[in-house]
């Protein structure tokens, strides 16, 4: 089938123009600056600019929020994946489908739905208000429920991330756990391990590949998002994604924006490298 | 314990679905405010269909998604066959570059394309948007067609040639049917990714051309609008219907083609979406 090689050439050209060159352009803009007379000079000015406390704190905040939402997704998603993979439900496939369907709705509309829930006069607060009124009329009780007021705060952004990315945590863990060799669990039980021991020594180590890809799949989009923070965090809320967007669409500082993109790319590569190393260390030998 | 587990599943699903269900309910609410139910109405749906901004962006979304995924499927399928037959080093290089848009954060892909378009003086608008969508779609087509090529029995093609088929005829009758499921998966994946994309489109469009995601974002930033609730309801119901149809079809295919006990989950495209649209 060697004569079909030429079929790849159009795409090779396309790749050069639309994948390689654009990335080189980002690199180019990040290390150059325009002098007043219009010529370009090589400089690290754009990266130096990033070392201001204001920008560093944006980076730290992005990483922290992504870590928080990844941890929350793991804590909520891991048990769910285990339960779904267990024998409690007959129609497992339907339930897994159900966990995935919300992801097929436009994610802006999903994020928007939380705006309507969390608003000051939003659905949650209105619901509390109704409860209070009902208690007053029927039970003669003076009930004061707290009001949710987290829209345009960090909590709302974390909530939005967890809501949007939770299925990315559930799916990989589910697919690993559901393919787990049942006889290993039975063997561990036969050898006298109680549920906790079986979980700690057998199930959890074997589910780690799923956990790792879940963590990657939640952390990456969470650390690079700029939409969730813009809608649920308000116009002034800054994550690194928002900072990049601002450089290109408002300030017109392409050099700094490109430098920020390079930093974001390095951050992603670093965490991916970290994850894959961890995976190798634990791969295969995890059971023993 | 069993009860506890079931309630946990229920609670998580409540968390996942409550926002959507509430949106659907309020899309029929006569009052604009969230808190109060003042009666059933279809007014928001009527206004939605009269809203020229939303309708234009719907038109652009569908056109771009169809064109981009069609072109990406053709280019990507051809490329897969070519790459598959390359020497190892070249193949590795091609596949690695192909992987870049998948791994790259969307925001970086978006701004890098924007820099390209402005450098080679392509005005931001329909053309740039289409080119961007094709670019991020092709890798997914290649990634879905490649495994099918690897699974294919190479000798089938040679046998066809030995039996006197011309290369083109053998390609049409042997290779294409073998990789068709991968091609269709790739096309559907590209279609949904393109339909839902926000970040890359956001940076590569201009001149008043905007897709549905961009319009929704700009409306949502201005505040809550009952029209958006109506739009969400329509989108959710259509996604649900599409998934049900696709699943019934694939499970039929599965039972027809494989023995029952071998029935696995993998044949289904729609179970494993990517993180792309975020």
Image: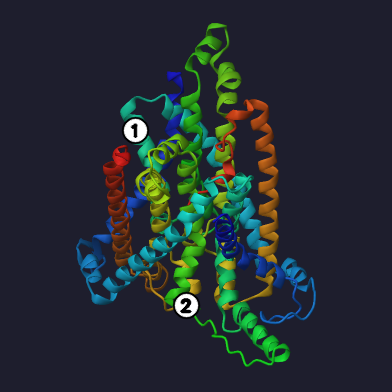
Label 2, secondary structure: give it: loop
Q: Nearer the viewer, residue A200 or A8?
A: A200
Q: Is residue A79 visible?
A: yes
- The residue sitting at 30% across, 65% down in the picture is A255
Residue B219 falls in which quadrant of the image? bottom right
Q: Nearer the viewer, residue A122 or A13?
A: A122
Q: Quadrant of the N terminus of chain B?
A: bottom right
Q: Chain of mark 1?
A: B
- The residue sitting at 59% across, 21% down in the picture is B172
Mark 1, Cα crowd under 10 Å, few <14 / some 14-19 / many 20+, is some
Label 1, secondary structure: give it: helix
Name the residue tied to disc 1.
Answer: B92
Q: Is residue A177 above or below residue A3?
A: below
Report x, y in % for residue B218.
Answer: 56, 71
Q: Are marks 1 and 2 on the same chain?
A: no
Q: Between label 1 and label 2, give the one nearer the viewer.
A: 2
- The residue sitting at 48% across, 74% down in the picture is A156
The residue lying furthest to the top in this view is B163
Residue B106 falls in which quadrant of the image? bottom left
Whole-Å distance between the Cαs marked 1 and 2? 44 Å
- The residue sitting at 34% across, 33% down in the picture is B92
Report x, y in % for residue A86.
Answer: 53, 46
Q: Nearer the viewer, residue A98 or A58?
A: A98
Q: Image check: B26 left or right of B222?
A: right
Report x, y in % for residue A272.
Answer: 32, 50
Name the residue tied to disc 2.
Answer: A234
């Amino acid at each position: 089938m060697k004569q079909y090689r030429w079929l790849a050439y159009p795409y090779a050209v396309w790749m050069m123009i639309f994948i390689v060159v654009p990335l080189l352009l980002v690199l180019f803009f990040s290390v150059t600056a325009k002098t007043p007379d219009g010529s370009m000079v090589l400089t690290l000015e754009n990266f130096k600019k990033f070392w201001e406390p204001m920008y560093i704190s944006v980076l730290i905040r992005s990483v922290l929020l992504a870590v928080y939402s990844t941890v929350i997704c793991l804590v909520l998603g891991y048990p769910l994946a285990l339960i779904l993979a267990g024998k409690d439900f007959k129609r497992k496939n339907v339930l897994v489908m159900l966990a995935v369907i919300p992801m097929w709705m436009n994610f802006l509309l999903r994020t928007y739905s939380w705006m309507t829930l969390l608003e000051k006069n939003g659905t949650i607060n209105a619901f509390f208000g109704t409860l209070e009124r009902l208690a007053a009329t029927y039970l003669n009780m003076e009930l004061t429920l707290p009001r949710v007021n987290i829209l345009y705060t960090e909590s709302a952004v974390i909530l939005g991330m967890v809501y949007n990315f939770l299925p990315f945590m559930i799916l990989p863990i589910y697919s690993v756990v559901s393919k787990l060799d049942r006889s290993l669990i039975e063997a561990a039980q036969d050898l006298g391990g109680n549920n906790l021991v079986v979980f700690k020594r057998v199930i959890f180590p074997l589910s780690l590949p799923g956990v790792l890809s879940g963590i990657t799949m939640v952390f990456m989009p969470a650390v690079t998002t700029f939409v969730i923070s813009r809608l649920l965090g308000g116009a002034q809320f800054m994550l690194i994604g928002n900072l990049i967007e601002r450089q290109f669409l408002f300030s017109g500082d392409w050099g700094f924006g490109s430098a920020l993109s390079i930093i974001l790319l390095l951050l992603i590569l670093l965490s991916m490298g970290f994850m894959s190393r961890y995976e190798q260390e634990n791969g295969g030998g995890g059971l023993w | 314990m069993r009860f506890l587990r079931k309630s946990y599943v229920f609670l998580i699903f409540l968390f996942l679905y409550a926002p959507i269900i509430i949106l659907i309910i309020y899309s029929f609410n006569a009052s604009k405010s969230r808190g109060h139910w003042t009666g059933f109405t279809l007014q928001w749906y009527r206004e939605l269909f009269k809203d020229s901004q939303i309708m234009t962006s719907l038109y652009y979304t569908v056109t771009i998604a169809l064109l981009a995924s069609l072109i990406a499927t053709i280019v990507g399928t051809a490329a897969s066959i070519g790459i598959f037959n390359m020497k190892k080093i070249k193949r590795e290089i091609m596949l690695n570059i192909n992987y870049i848009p998948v791994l790259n954060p969307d925001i970086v892909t978006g701004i890098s394309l924007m820099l390209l378009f402005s450098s080679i003086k392509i005005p931001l608008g329909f053309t740039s948007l289409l080119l961007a969508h094709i670019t991020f779609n092709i890798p997914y087509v290649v990634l879905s067609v490649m495994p099918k090529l690897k699974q294919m029995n190479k000798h089938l093609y040679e046998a066809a040639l030995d039996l006197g088929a011309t290369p083109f005829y053998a390609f049409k009758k042997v290779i294409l049917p073998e990789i068709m499921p991968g091609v269709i998966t790739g096309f559907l994946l590209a279609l949904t990714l393109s339909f839902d994309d926000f970040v890359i489109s956001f940076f590569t469009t201009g001149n008043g051309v905007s897709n549905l995601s961009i319009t929704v974002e700009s409306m949502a930033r201005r505040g809550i609008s009952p029209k958006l609730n109506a739009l969400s309801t329509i989108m959710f119901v259509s996604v649900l219907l599409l998934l049900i149809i696709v699943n019934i079809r694939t499970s039929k295919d599965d039972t027809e083609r494989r023995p029952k006990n071998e029935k696995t989950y993998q044949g289904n495209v729609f179970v494993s979406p990517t993180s792309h649209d975020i």
